[in-house]
Amino acid sequence: MKVPFLPPIARWLVPALLALATALPAHALRIKEVAAVQGVRSNQLTGYGLVVGLDGTGDQTTQMPITTQAMQNYLLQAGISLPAGATAPQLKNVATVIVTAQLPAFAQPGQAIDVTVASMGNAKSLKGGTLIATPLRGADGEIYAMAQGNVVVGGAGAAAGGSKVQINHLSAGRVPDGAQVERSVPT
């Protein structure tokens, strides 16, 4: 096959343009990065739970009887009940917490989302604790996710001889990928 006549400038311009086009990187953008779909948004979830496994830094149950009640309810659900007339135990290794998460738009069942945990009692620290299974509800009262896992606290503290040093909050933390979506939000 014979190539039709090309002017002299085109003989070097066409290959140069082809080389330039293949050398430039392509910038692909996802639609969600440049557009917003009307009526589609994330949803706030919240729940009430218990963090266990604290090293004596949990709630003082004499001042926070809700912690004892929540622990007794949890044990009852597990089939364990305290004997009648038994005094409530001092649970220095347990803290009552509020659990929050943001359910992204188009989240599907089985997807993992991050969770924030904050003490609602008088716990000194949630460091080293584990959040036990906590249902997370939407504004409509329905359960959309279940949270559970090890709490990561972004602070540090030390005390000795009457002195105390603390960096950031020890009574709040995160559980990365700590909730599993149970149901999607209808759109």
Image (cartoon, helix red, strand yellow):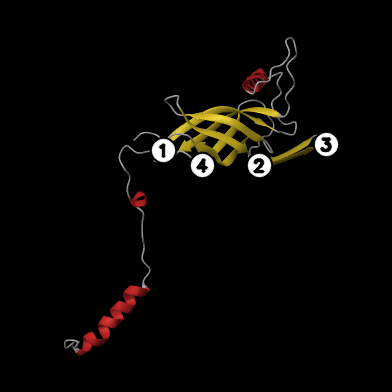
Q: Is residue 99 above or below residue 107?
A: above
Who comes first in sequence, dot 4 or dot 3? 4
| Farthest-out residue, top | 85
User: In front of the other: label 1 or label 4?
Assistant: 4
For label 3, the residue is: 161
For label 4, the residue is: 112
Q: Is residue 38 above or below residue 93?
A: below
Q: Amino acid at mark 3?
A: Gly
For label 1, the residue is: 42
Q: CA distance from mark 2 to mark 3?
A: 21 Å
Who comes first in sequence, dot 2 or dot 3? 2
Q: CA distance from mark 1 to mark 4?
A: 14 Å
Q: Amino acid at mark 4?
A: Ala
Question: For the point 36% across and 60% down, which residue is it?
Answer: 28
**Place of residue 42 in the rendered image (x, y in percent of width and height, measured from the top left):** 41, 38
Q: Amino acid at mark 2?
A: Gly
In this picture, residue 74 sits left or right of residue 23: right
Q: Which mark is residue 155?
A: 2
Task: Give the class, few, some or many, for how many residues have Cα within 10 Å of label 4's Cα (few <14, many ≥20).
Answer: some
Report helix, strand or loop for mark 1.
Answer: loop
Q: CA distance from mark 4 to mark 3?
A: 43 Å
Q: Are marks 1 and 4 in contact (CB under 8 Å)?
A: no
**Place of residue 32 in the rendered image (x, y in percent of width and height, measured from the top left):** 36, 49
**Place of residue 10 in the rendered image (x, y in percent of width and height, measured from the top left):** 22, 85
Report the quarter where the N terminus lies: bottom left
Report helix, strand or loop for mark 2.
Answer: loop
Who comes first in sequence, dot 2 or dot 1? 1
Residue 77 sits in quarter: top right
Q: CA distance from mark 3 to mark 1?
A: 48 Å
